């Protein structure tokens, strides 16, 4: 026989249980992280195929007038860490410049005379027999005037 | 079935008379694991909290569950020093919760402060998954009688002998365990759905797992991952096995006997993911112990003194 305390708690705890289950069910099918700790779990969910390039890591470079390519380190130069750096590189790779204006401004202030920013990915590809070397790929070249326009 | 019947079934499922020992074990494992991570894992240590504040202000967007706190503070932007202060308090609360001293308050304050720290950190845009399950687990424990036994509080009360405490049951002792188990089930369903939907129904093609094994293996220097990425058929089998596991794990919650099959596989999968991908889901591994019916195990091993009738009653209640 449940105690009086337990019986009083049942309705409140039941509402809580129901709310937690509902929140996780709804969040689990939506790709939003806003309602953390109720999340979807799309880790490793994208499909990949034979001969596809592997994003082992991205690199972002600032190219100055003397032709030197200055590697921009996630922590030392941009102070944003590995995962944000990867996201930044992917977004710059598809010319999402406005939404990354603050990072471009940081790069421009570090290299005031830069000519362009280059985004590069790691040269590997997947095959049925495992990863194989692939030629270097510059995924995007962002000219100086596009950087200035985004930062403006 | 009438509404009354539904409510009775609901109450029977979530509020059976269950051993408090199982809940206390979950408290000790969850709080102990989280304290261990905060003290020993560089990703959760005090100095990491200052790193977030070195980011530009534009990264800081308080998550919805943090906004009421920010609002209550009059829109104050929480600083790294304040969060570091909270972190130290969280360690103290956590230690009290671990040993069960003022456990109701300590557990609540530990869960609350840990959730605030995580929400603040994640408001800088870098969302991670392992901390979410731990946060909800701590909240469940905070709202339940998790410190009723195996605690300093229980020792100080002296109303029951140690034997009576270890054999004690309560109608509010099972729901946090069941809810956390369901949380795992729902996380797996979400992961399964994402693989179908995000993967455009081409996910289980062998190459996908080879790709991730190679990617993370090289990125995080996992020799096992890189080695595994060379074997297409092994990857193909692994992918179908993962899909099947994630899609059907919830059955073990409806039919508890299936836990004997699913839980060891799940534990092996999460440890394997760490070894192959170096993806540190330590919180999940720790919380997986929620599936172990501790009281039943202790009774089976003869560590809990009880007569035959009580033994089978405890085993049934613990393993349900």
Image: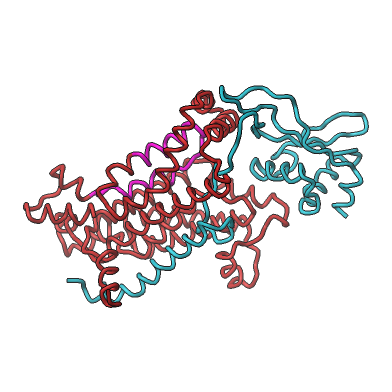
Chain identifier, cyan in the render: A
Q: Quadrant of residue B80?
A: bottom right
Q: Residue at x 14, y 49 (%)?
A: B304
**Depth check, front residue: B282 or B227:** B227
Q: Residue at x 29, y 72 (%)?
A: B6
Prevailing secondary structure class for the magenta stretch in the rendered image: helix
> x and y percent of residue B306 in the render?
9, 52
B207 lies left or right of B13: right
Q: Can the viewer see residue B155 in this picture?
A: no
In the image, is residue A3 above or below residue B126? below
> x and y percent of residue A93 in the render?
76, 42
In the image, is residue A40 above or below residue B199? below
Report the quarter where the N terminus of chain B lies. Answer: bottom left
B268 lies left or right of A115: left
> x and y percent of residue A107 in the render?
81, 43
Asked if the stretch drawn in magenta spans residue B280, the answer is: yes
Magenta residues (range):
B265-294
Q: Residue at x 27, y 43 (%)?
A: B260
Colour mode of the rendering? by chain
> x and y percent of residue A50 in the render?
61, 30
Report the quarter where the C terminus of chain B lies. Answer: bottom left
Q: Can the viewer see residue B317 in this picture?
A: yes
Asked if the stretch drawn in magenta spans residue B271, the answer is: yes
Q: Quadrant of residue A80?
A: top right
Q: Quadrant of residue B76?
A: bottom right
Q: Residue at x 38, y 42 (%)?
A: B266
**Depth check, front residue: A51 or B316:** A51
Chain identifier, red in the render: B
């Amino acid at each position: 026989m449940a105690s009086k305390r337990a019986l009083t708690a049942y309705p409140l705890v039941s509402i809580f249980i129901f709310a937690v289950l509902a929140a996780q069910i709804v969040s689990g099918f939506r790709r939003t992280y806003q309602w953390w700790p109720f999340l979807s779990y799309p880790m490793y969910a994208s499909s990949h195929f034979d001969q596809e390039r592997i994003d082992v890591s991205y690199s972002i470079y600032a190219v100055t007038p003397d032709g030197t390519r200055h590697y921009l380190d996630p922590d030392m130069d941009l102070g944003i860490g590995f995962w944000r750096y990867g996201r930044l590189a992917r977004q710059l790779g598809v010319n999402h410049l406005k939404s990354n204006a603050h990072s471009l401004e940081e790069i421009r202030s570090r290299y005031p005379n830069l000519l362009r920013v280059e985004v590069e990915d790691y040269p590997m590809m997947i095959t049925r027999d495992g990863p194989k070397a692939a030629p270097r790929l510059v995924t995007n070249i962002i000219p100086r005037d596009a950087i200035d326009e985004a930062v403006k | 079935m009438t509404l009354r019947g539904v409510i009775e079934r609901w109450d029977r499922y979530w509020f059976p008379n269950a051993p408090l020992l199982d809940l206390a074990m979950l408290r000790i494992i969850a709080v102990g694991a989280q304290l261990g991570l905060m003290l020993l894992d560089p990703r959760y240590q005090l100095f990491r909290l200052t790193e977030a504040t070195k980011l530009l202000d534009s990264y800081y967007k308080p998550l919805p569950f943090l906004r009421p706190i920010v609002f209550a503070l009059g829109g104050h932007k929480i600083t790294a020093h304040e969060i570091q202060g909270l972190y130290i308090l969280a360690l103290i609360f956590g230690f009290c919760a671990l040993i069960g001293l003022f456990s109701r308050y300590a557990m609540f304050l530990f869960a609350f402060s840990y959730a605030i720290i995580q929400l603040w950190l994640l408001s800088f845009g870098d969302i991670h998954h392992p901390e979410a399950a731990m946060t909800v687990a701590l909240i469940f424990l905070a709202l339940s009688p998790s410190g009723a036994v195996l605690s300093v509080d229980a020792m100080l009360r002296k109303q029951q002998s140690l034997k009576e405490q270890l054999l004690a049951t309560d109608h509010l002792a099972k729901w946090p365990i069941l809810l956390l188990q369901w949380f795992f089930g729902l996380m797996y369903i979400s992961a399964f759905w994402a693989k179908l939907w995000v993967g455009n129904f081409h996910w289980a093609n062998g190459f996908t797992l080879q790709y991730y094994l190679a990617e993370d293996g090289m990125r995080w220097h996992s020799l096992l991952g890189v080695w595994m990425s060379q074997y297409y058929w092994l990857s193909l089998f692994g992918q179908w096995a993962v899909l099947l596991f994630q899609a059907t794990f919830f059955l073990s919650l409806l039919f508890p006997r299936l836990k004997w099959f699913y839980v060891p596989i799940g534990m092996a999968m999460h440890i394997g993911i760490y070894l192959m991908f170096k993806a540190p889901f330590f919180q999940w591994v720790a919380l997986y112990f929620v599936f172990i019916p501790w009281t039943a195990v202790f009774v089976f091993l003869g560590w809990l003194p009880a007569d035959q009738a009580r033994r089978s009653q405890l085993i049934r209640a613990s393993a349900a």
